[in-house]
Amino acid sequence: MKNPKFSYIIRAICGVYLLWIVWDFANAFLKGENLSLLMIIAAIAFAFFGIVFVITGIRGWMRVNKEQKEEAENPSKEQEQPKKEEPSGAGHGMSLSERANLVKSLGKVEETEDKKEEER
């Protein structure tokens, strides 16, 4: 299972990195360097996505922390109740098409057995 906390932290760090690049663009512009239109558009896009990444990363990280604390304080009802037994044949990893093919092949086996008995 992947760790959602880690992915939110990485997202926030990426956002900070994008904002740092925007900061460098701004410092270069203020020092009088001539920036092309493409660099200005890139700086605006980096600023937008950097802010979005930082906000969503921090909010997601806080939400996961809150959920983990709630789970620790209040164990879920599913864990307390015993598991119900599944009906036979369910959950054995066969898809519906595999089961249908199995039924077809069993039908063919029965037909060949019937023919062999008739021949005797």
Image (spheres, rainbow, N blue to C red):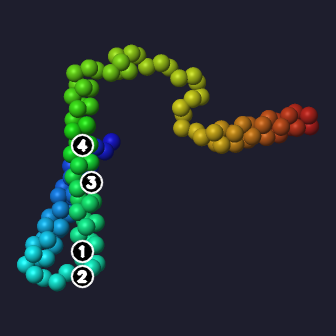
Circle 1 sits on which residue?
Answer: 40
Marks 2 and 3 close (CB-CB < 8 Å)? no
Tell which circle, 2 or 3, labels the residue nearer the N-terminal end.
Answer: 2
Q: Earlier in the sequence, mark 4 or mark 1?
A: 1
Task: Residue 103: name its quadrant.
Answer: top right
Q: Are marks 2 and 4 in contact (CB under 8 Å)?
A: no
Residue at the farthest bottom position: 34
Residue that sits furthest to the right in the current view: 119
The span from disc 2 to disc 4 (Cα, nearest Å) is 35 Å
> How dense is the environment of label 4, judged by Cα within 10 Å: few (below 14), some, or many (20 and up)?
some
Residue linked to disc 3: 52
- The residue where tag 2 is placed is 36
Find residue 114 and report its horizontal and vertical position in percent. Answer: 86, 34
Residue 37 image offset from top left, x and y in percent: 27, 79
The Cα–Cα distance between marks 2 and 3, rounded to whole angstroms, is 25 Å
Which quarter of the image is occupied by the C terminus? Answer: top right
Residue lying at the far top in this picture: please name it: 81
Q: Residues within 10 Å of mark 3 (few under 14, many from 20)?
A: some
Residue that label 4 marks: 59
Q: Is residue 45 left or right of residue 100?
A: left
Foreground mark, 4 or 1?
1
